[in-house]
Image (tube, helix red, strand yellow):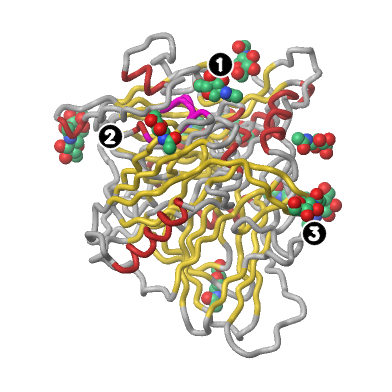
């Protein structure tokens, strides 16, 4: 109840403008609980924040400080990550379990400080502990400072849209099962829009998500892909939309009839209600470049206000094929920063650190020969530059700050240890073993980094939505096949590349990003497909302190959870 009051006060304050125009402090209380939920004619108990699914939306303005007291009243360890928030010099509240903190154990609480800086638009928050983010998540809406406008006409209303995934079973069991048997996790039983599957699924018609619009008005949709394992295609029947932002950074407007959105990514778009007053589907289904997947379609309804006879049935929009990599890439390649005087870009050009990371699925032998559920009876693992992440028993950040040895090693490689033709045909295995490790790559303060992600064709290849904590980065280039370091940099976009914190590296292709390492701390980098991170597709950067107080990490809060 208290949390609800906080939430309402937050919204009221926002509407009445009681707080100063920026650097306001906003407080929320999160209570993790085991909560009963019914979907698809079946009941289960699952982890939620404040009994809500999706969880509460946090509202703030650019540059605010949000303080969230997280109480664990459930039976599962938890951590909360503020996805896309840079947390300048303050990794202590970032959240990834055993990277920046030990879990908040049942019966304990942790007060997290979400330090907003230049983010403006839509972000989100989610659990970063095992698979609990399937149900522990919500939107984080960052409005412009009070004196500022959007770089587009003021919308009539704003609507969060969270794409998600539903398993009839307990997600913890789904996770334990695939980690035990070494194979793929079970695919989900439904896809969701704002927690509801929509009327194409059994027992779901009643609760389908609906938005009412007025003819002639324009609406801002703030879309988050919170899916565990899928990139999504999203469409609205009969309507084009105008994309205006992604990952809390504005983009040049894109008029399009479909959207591709990666798990972790956000897309802000405008919908002009300019069709015959009626009801129309909004719908989403999977883009999958490999493997088995949930091939169902989730729907919501755009309902025009007014007097008309509603259609007896709605027409589904036509989607690109499930495996249409070209359509997925074509959308993402249109994203461009505004690159205007008011919203300048600042792409590093004098690069001090060039990193080349091969991101790959793979297998390791089954403990009981050939009895695992992965390819050829083996066990799935995944790696970055041949290192498969194993989480330590205490946090990397704690070990770094307190100089505790034996928790991690400083030798995460800048290049793959065994160069090969990463995207050659029919690669089913490698001649070398994947190495387990908790290895960090150390960057000097203010170094300018170019990082090329190279996908590989081992086990056929698949897209990887890569996410970096503590930073946004410019996506300066991407392509199919192997990155060619003499040819490809000539085509980089250094003029108006999009500023992102999650980017899908295309199947058997590469993506190049750039950022300035001006945020000292310990920052996780990983694939945002949950099954891939479970198999070890992640690594950690340590960005050292620079000279001067403003270039140094801040001290930890007194209530940091302990291992
Ligand atoms: C789900 O729970 C509700 C309320 O407790 C109950 O009425 C209903 O019968 C249950 N449904 C199933 C399928 O167990
Ligand atoms: C929150 O945790 C602190 C210790 O970090 C404890 O003193 C306090 O009582 C806890 N508050 C509640 C409401 O559980
Ligand atoms: C996963 O799917 C298999 C096959 O349908 C089923 O037998 C198993 O119970 C499922 N596991 C969970 C945790 O739901
Ligand atoms: C809708 O977007 C598509 C591109 O996705 C474009 O070809 C088409 O012209 C647009 N239609 C309108 C009416 O703007
Ligand atoms: C989804 O897959 C099932 C089998 O797994 C198949 O029967 C069904 O036709 C597929 N649906 C679509 C829309 O492709
Ligand atoms: C997509 O799958 C269809 C079969 O379902 C296949 O014919 C087609 O070649 C595939 N396309 C791509 C780009 O892999
Ligand atoms: C590029 O960076 C190097 C190393 O930091 C520095 O010595 C050099 O002056 C820089 N050059 C330019 C043109 O900024
Ligand atoms: C890598 O493999 C691809 C696909 O088999 C092939 O087309 C390409 O020529 C190879 N590149 C090199 C440098 O061998
Ligand atoms: C690597 O780590 C995984 C996950 O912790 C574990 O199952 C596996 O046994 C480890 N392999 C080796 C060779 O240590
Ligand atoms: C980091 O680099 C920026 C841009 O070149 C510069 O303005 C700033 O002074 C540098 N900071 C430190 C502490 O070296
Ligand atoms: C890389 O591109 C250069 C310039 O286009 C070309 O000469 C070279 O053969 C390419 N290298 C590979 C391995 O394809
Ligand atoms: C919860 O976290 C603590 C502290 O790291 C750890 O000792 C414990 O094993 C964890 N519990 C579970 C069930 O993972
Ligand atoms: Cu991946």
Front: mark 2 or 3: 3
At x 71%, y 15%, the residue is: 365
Answer yes or no: is residue 88 visible. Answer: yes
Q: Is residue 104 magenta?
A: yes
For the point 31% across and 34% down, the residue is 90
Label 3 or label 1, whichever lies nearer to me, is: 3
Q: Which mark is residue 436?
A: 1
Quadrant of ligand 7 in image: top left
Secondary structure mostly taken by the magenta-highlighted segment of the chain:
loop
Identify the secondary structure beneath mark 3. loop
The image quarter containing residue 89 is top left
**Label 1 CB-ligand 9 distance < 8 A:** yes
Q: Residue 345: x percent and y percent?
A: 28, 52
Q: Residue at x 42, y 14 (%)?
A: 409
Mark 3, residues whose alpha carbon is within 10 Å: few (<14), some, or many (≥20)? few
Residue highlighted by disc 3: 202
Q: Specify the segment rendered in magenta.
A: 93-105
């Amino acid at each position: 109840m208290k949390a609800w009051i906080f939430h309402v006060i937050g919204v009221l304050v926002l509407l009445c403008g009681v707080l100063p125009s920026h650097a306001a402090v906003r407080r929320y209380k999160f209570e993790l609980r085991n909560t009963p939920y019914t979907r698809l004619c079946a009941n289960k108990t699952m982890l939620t924040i404040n009994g809500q699914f999706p969880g509460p939306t946090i509202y703030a303005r650019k540059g605010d400080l949000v303080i969230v007291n997280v109480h664990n009243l459930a039976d599962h360890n938890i951590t909360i990550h503020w996805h896309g928030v840079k947390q300048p010099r303050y990794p202590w509240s970032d959240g990834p379990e055993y990277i920046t903190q030990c879990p908040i154990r049942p019966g304990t609480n942790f007060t997290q400080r979400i330090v907003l800086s230049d983010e403006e638009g839509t972000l989100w928050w989610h659990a970063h502990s095992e698979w609990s983010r399937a149900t522990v998540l919500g939107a984080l809406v960052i409005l412009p400072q009070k004196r500022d406008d959007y770089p587009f006409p003021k919308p009539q209303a704003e609507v969060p849209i969270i794409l998600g995934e539903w398993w009839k079973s307990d997600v913890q069991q789904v996770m334990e099962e695939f980690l035990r048997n070494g194979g793929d996790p079970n695919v989900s039983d439904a896809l969701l829009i704002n927690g509801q599957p929509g009327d194409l699924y059994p027992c779901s018609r009643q609760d389908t998500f609906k938005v009412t619009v007025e003819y002639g008005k324009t609406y801002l949709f703030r879309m988050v892909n919170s899916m565990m394992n899928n990139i999504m295609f999203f469409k609205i029947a009969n309507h084009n939309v105008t994309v205006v932002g992604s990952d809390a950074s504005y983009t040049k407007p894109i008029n399009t009839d479909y959207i591709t959105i990666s798990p972790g990514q956000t897309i802000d778009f405008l919908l002009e209600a300019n069709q015959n007053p009626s009801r129309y589907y909004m719908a989403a289904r999977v883009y999958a470049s490999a493997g088995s997947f949930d091939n169902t379609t989730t729907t919501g309804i755009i309902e025009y206000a007014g007097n008309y006879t509603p259609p007896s049935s709605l027409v589904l929009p036509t989607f690109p094929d499930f495996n249409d990599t070209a359509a997925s890439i074509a959308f993402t390649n249109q994203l461009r920063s505004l690159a205007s005087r008011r919203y300048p870009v600042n792409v590093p050009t004098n690069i001090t650190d060039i990193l080349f990371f091969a991101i790959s699925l793979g297998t390791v032998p089954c403990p009981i020969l050939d009895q695992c559920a992965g390819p050829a009876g083996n066990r799935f693992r995944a790696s970055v530059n041949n290192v498969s992440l194993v989480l330590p028993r205490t946090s990397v950040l704690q070990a770094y700050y307190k100089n505790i040895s034996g928790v991690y090693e400083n030798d995460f490689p800048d290049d793959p240890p065994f160069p090969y033709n990463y995207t050659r045909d029919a690669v089913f295995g490698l001649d070398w073993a994947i190495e387990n490790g908790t290895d960090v790559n150390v960057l000097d303060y203010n170094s300018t980094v170019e990082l090329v992600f190279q996908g590989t064709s081992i086990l056929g290849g698949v897209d990887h939505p890569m996410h970096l904590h503590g930073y946004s980065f410019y996506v300066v280039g991407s392509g199919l096949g192997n990155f060619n370091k003499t040819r490809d940099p000539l085509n980089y976009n250094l003029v108006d590349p999009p500023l992102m914190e999650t980017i899908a590296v295309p199947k058997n292709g590469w993506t190049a990003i750039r950022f300035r390492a001006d945020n000292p701390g310990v920052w996780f980098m990983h694939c945002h497909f949950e099954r891939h991170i479970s198999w070890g597709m992640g690594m950690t950067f340590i960005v050292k302190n620079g000279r001067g107080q403003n270039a140094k990490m801040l001290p930890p809060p007194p209530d940091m959870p302990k291992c």
